[in-house]
Image: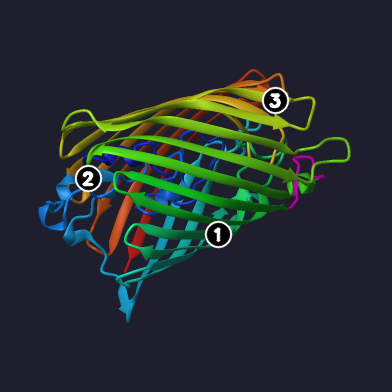
């Protein structure tokens, strides 16, 4: 069995979040900012993320995995692990969060720099089955952000997520996932309308069904996904209404992946996803496009202390709009994690892809990103995380090029197995060829979390 520490590179592209659901103004497009961990078999639905290798050793030959051999960002020492609430064959994990944040530039603007304090209050309830076979996991969550002086920026996000796996036999599983959410796009982000003075609300419904099967050392998966968007309107700085109805619509995708394991610690893979974007657009402009992305590479433990994944491929997106046309080019990804000790993980990631600024907009973007970060366990209950990201975005269909710089830092203190406290800092800067999109901001926050 592959040791989780040997596989720590699976989640190395995940950054420290400022606060759960933090303001995402001008977040990097390539490297995700939210620390979501998808253990197997859920990661089969994220075909461009590293996938768990098949278990090649017999059960009686597998060594138990100690907490110190688990990546620091997912490590849980027994004395600091929440117990949860059990009810029959179900386990419930309720969580309450509260925090405050200072933002030096709430509108992410280079002309109207206004600071403010905000309070964040959130709650979630996670429920999962404890069945020997099959499994269901549900999570309901809500997060409110309330500003002291700029009440127009107040927002409440809510979501209901679910996923399930049906074990057809010992080697075959049917995976299903859905999400229904009411969310907002942050003012000043790449997906927010130019000149918006308030967050842009939208509804999202997403679903995915994947069939996954292991044939000894070979693992194959194939699935279908659909995402439906329904955007509301926002308000411009001059008080007028900005309609976002043109971005409503559906995105359909079919995806497949093959992994072949040479050993419990090395594998090669190939993955491809095709998409069809069917959006409302405007009477004078179509937002529709069709495309695909394909990657192939190797996932390997180079030494006992170094793990990595290296992949290359190609992407093409054909837009109905003659202003954009066809955007195509190479796509690559490299992830390397070095653990000089059991208390320190250092990771370096780089990726290039051709994408759109958002799934529901017309403009295409050629993005190149690099990230360096570390997780350091000062004590069992004190963890320092730092990550720096650089990204260059070249826009197609617009005379615009952006350079984005982000620095994240978090100091997390686990007081006991129920409560924790975190101090957070984020620096963001965007340098754009169109000066009106330039901005710089600092965010400092504190967050308390109670998990039963």
Quarter of the image holding residue 132? bottom left
Residue 66 picture location, percent across and down: 14, 51
Q: Residue 72 vs residue 196: left or right? A: left
Q: Along the polypeptide, which appears first: circle 1 or circle 2? A: 2
Which residue is at 16% across, 54% downward?
Answer: 58
Task: Measure how far apart labels 1 and 2 are at the Cα level.
Answer: 30 Å
Mark 1, residue position: 179
Task: Measure how far apart labels 3 and 1 are at the Cα level.
Answer: 31 Å
Element under label 1? strand
Q: Compared to 450, does 21 lie above or below?
A: above
The chosen color scheme is rainbow
Start-end of magenta stretch: 232-241
Task: Measure how far apart labels 3 and 2 are at the Cα level.
Answer: 41 Å
Mark 3, residue position: 326
Element under label 3? strand
Please name whichever residue, 297 or 33, is drawn nearer the observer in this view of the structure. Answer: 297
Question: Principal SS element in the magenta part?
Answer: loop
In the displayed image of the protein, which residue is found farthest to the right? 283
Residue 356 picture location, percent across and down: 63, 33
Q: Please tell me whether mark 3 or mark 1 is closer to you in this view.
A: 3
Q: Residue 428 vs residue 50: left or right? A: right
Mark 2, residue position: 2
Quadrant of image for the C terminus: bottom left
Q: Along the polypeptide, which appears first: circle 3 or circle 1? A: 1
Q: Mark 1 and mark 3 in contact (Cβ < 8 Å)?
A: no
């Amino acid at each position: 069995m592959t040791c989780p520490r040997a596989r720590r590179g699976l989640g190395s592209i995940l950054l420290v979040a400022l606060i759960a659901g933090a303001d995402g103004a001008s977040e990097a497009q390539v490297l995700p900012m939210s620390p979501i961990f998808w253990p197997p078999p859920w990661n089969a639905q994220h075909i461009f993320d590293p996938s768990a290798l098949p278990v090649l050793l017999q059960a009686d030959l597998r060594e138990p995995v100690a907490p110190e051999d688990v990546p620091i960002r997912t490590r849980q020492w027994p004395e600091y692990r929440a117990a949860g609430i059990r009810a029959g064959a179900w386990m419930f994990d309720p969580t309450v969060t509260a925090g405050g944040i200072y933002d030096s530039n709430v509108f992410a603007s280079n002309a109207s720099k206004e600071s403010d304090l905000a309070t964040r209050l959130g709650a979630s309830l996670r429920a999962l089955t404890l069945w020997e076979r099959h499994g269901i996991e549900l999570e309901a969550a809500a997060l409110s952000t309330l500003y002291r002086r700029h009440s127009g920026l107040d927002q409440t996000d809510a979501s209901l997520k679910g996923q399930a796996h049906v074990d057809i036999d010992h080697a075959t599983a049917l995976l299903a996932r859905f999400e229904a959410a009411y969310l907002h796009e942050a003012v000043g982000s790449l997906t927010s309308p130019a000149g918006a003075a308030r967050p842009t609300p939208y509804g999202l419904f997403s679903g995915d069904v994947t069939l996954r099967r292991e044939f000894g050392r070979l693992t194959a998966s194939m699935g279908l996904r659909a995402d439906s968007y329904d955007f509301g309107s926002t308000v411009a700085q001059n008080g007028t209404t900005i309609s976002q109805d043109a971005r409503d619509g559906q995105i359909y995708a079919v995806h497949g992946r093959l992994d072949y394991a040479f050993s419990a610690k090395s594998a090669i893979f190939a993955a491809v996803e095709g998409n069809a974007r069917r959006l409302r657009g405007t009477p004078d402009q179509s937002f529709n496009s069709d495309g695909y992305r394909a990657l192939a590479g190797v996932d390997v433990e180079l030494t006992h202390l170094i793990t990595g994944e290296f992949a290359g491929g190609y992407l093409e997106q054909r837009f109905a709009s003659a202003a954009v046309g066809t955007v195509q080019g190479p796509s690559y990804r490299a992830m390397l994690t070095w653990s000089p000790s059991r208390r320190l993980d250092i990771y370096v990631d780089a990726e290039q892809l051709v994408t759109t600024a958002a799934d529901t907009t017309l403009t295409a973007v050629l993005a190149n990103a690099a990230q360096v970060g570390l997780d350091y366990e000062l004590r069992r209950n004190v963890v320092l995380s730092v990550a720096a990201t650089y990204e260059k975005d070249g826009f197609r269909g617009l005379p615009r090029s952006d350079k984005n710089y982000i620095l994240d830092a978090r100091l997390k203190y686990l007081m006991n197995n129920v409560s924790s406290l975190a101090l957070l800092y984020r620096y963001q800067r965007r340098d754009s060829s169109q000066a009106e999109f330039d901005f710089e901001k600092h965010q400092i926050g504190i967050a308390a979390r109670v998990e039963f």
